[in-house]
Image (tube, rainbow, N blue to C red):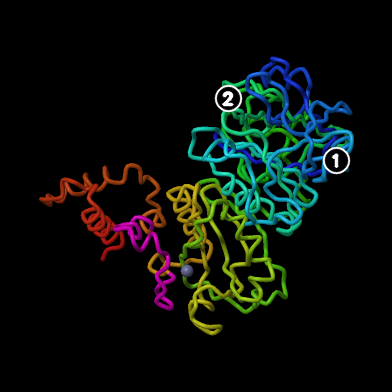
Amino acid sequence: MSRLAEVIPLAEVERIATVQAKGRSMAQVKAQEGCAYILNSYFYDLSTGRPVGHVKARGEVLSQAAWNCYGLSWDTGADVRMEVIPDRGGENWLSGVELLAPGRGPGAELDYPAAYGGRRGRSAVLLAGERLVLYCSKDGTSQAKTPEELRDELAELGREYAAGESLRALGLDSGGSSQCMFPGGEIHSSRRAAGYLCVWVKKKEDGRVKGRYRVVPSVGVNIRSGPGSGFPKGGAYSRGTTVEVLELRDGWGRTKEGWVCMDYLEAAPDGQEGQRRTDSGVAIVPDLIPPGSANRPGGVNACTYITVHETGNTAQGADAAAHGAYLKSEAAARDKVSWHYTVDDRSIVQHLPDGESAYHAGDGARGPGNLCSIGIEICVDRGGNFEAAKANAAALVRLLVKEHGIPLERVVQHNRWNGKDCPYTIRHTAGAWEEFLALCGGNTNSAPWYAQAQDWVRTQGVSGVDRPGDPATRAEVWQMLYNMRHGA
Ligand SMILES: [Zn+2]
């Protein structure tokens, strides 16, 4: 795991504390404190281990600088806020790098020491509405970020829960210090940080019952072989999955496939319709645009075509959930833009019922693209896995084809309706569209795709196609495979 962002409702926070490691490893601190979450926290002098800046823990001032700044302040935990410290701080405070603060909204210039710069593993705390988000990425991985990239990613994460201007985020000690243990995953570093932020959550066993629950975090939850994070992992449930909890023990629930931490589940309403899910197991998460919004016209969609788009949004964190939030915003209503599904590398979010028309094809309110097709946007966010996103989109197409009886010939590019160069990446990668259609047609065994192509080439006795990795050849071979499958 190289990046984790755990969302904790403040109402569920029992206590937050800054704990000095005093030579102990993160795992030892966590075990002795018995907290649910632990994350490296304050900056410290590497040679002496002494905290730097403002640190007050459980009423005891560990370090105080001569200046005031914005930092985290809290008395017990659920009251955590960003405040001018030390002047207006409570029983606990913590300074760091102001990533999002009053007067320093998303996109604003940052002010940090040179040592904090560069692309590194990052630790941070984000306050978004009624949520506390603990963030950690591993140093030296593709998830390492500059402070500005971290700020932007946190702003995107936070927009799911609150307006951009009200978001607050503090950068904690980063690089080799970045490490955490959360119920949903862990990031380890060989460095023993001087201090950790520990979060305890309220015990929820009381009143909990066996039954149907839905997975809440955007990263999903791990499935373990026993009731605790010490047991081996055996897979994960993606966000929105409905699970049946058969047994409860120590805050963990046993499902058909293994144990999951109950803190990540919310009770699924009774009488809920059967959950839609692709044949590859990805749950379809409804996040519908409110009825009456200007970008939800409410007309009838004939569902005779499926239109494939790419979001064109390469910003970090511009995933399916983020687009769901966007479609419910005033900007999307004003611009009259909408579609039915957004797909990223781990989830599928539905914005409109299939049977309602939308504004995605660019061919006018009465255009056949808008009136007859189901619009799917594939995410191209930086840091996301585009191949996995395409595979999920193809799985969604397979489901829609089955549900609505849409022939594969009517799975089309946005380009068909108004000439727009969309889906851009697919259109500009030789063979990618044919490969996508083959996946939509049920050819799920695409890895490695060229093995099948080579077999075909061998049986057909075609000469000169001995390097199927070559883009031109790849396109030709896929076209041939596709034509064969559809009898063209
Ligand atoms: Zn498009």
Q: Residue furthest front?
A: 66
- In which quadrant is the N terminus drawn? top right
Residue 306 visible? The answer is no
352 in relation to 265, above or below: below
17 in relation to 73, above or below: above
415 in relation to 142, above or below: below
Amino acid found under the numbered disc labelled 1: Ala
The residue shown at (48%, 81%) is 363
Q: Residue furthest top?
A: 23
Q: Which residue is mark 2?
A: 189
Residue 428 placed where, x, y %?
A: 34, 62
23 in relation to 441, above or below: above
User: Which one is earlier in the sequence, the residue at label 2 or at label 1?
Assistant: 1
Residue 231 placed where, x, y %?
A: 64, 22
Residue 30 placed where, x, y %?
A: 73, 22
**Kind of element beneath mark 1:** loop
Residue 285 visible? The answer is yes
Q: Which residues are magenta?
A: 414-436
Q: In this view of the protein, which residue sits in the foreground, 471 or 374?
A: 471
Q: Is mark 2 within 8 Å of ligand 1?
A: no
Amino acid found under the numbered disc labelled 2: Ser
Magenta highlight on residue 437: no
Q: Residues within 10 Å of mark 1 (few under 14, many from 20)?
A: many
Q: Residues within 10 Å of mark 2 (few under 14, many from 20)?
A: some
- In which quadrant is the C terminus drawn? bottom left
Q: Which residue is mark 1?
A: 78
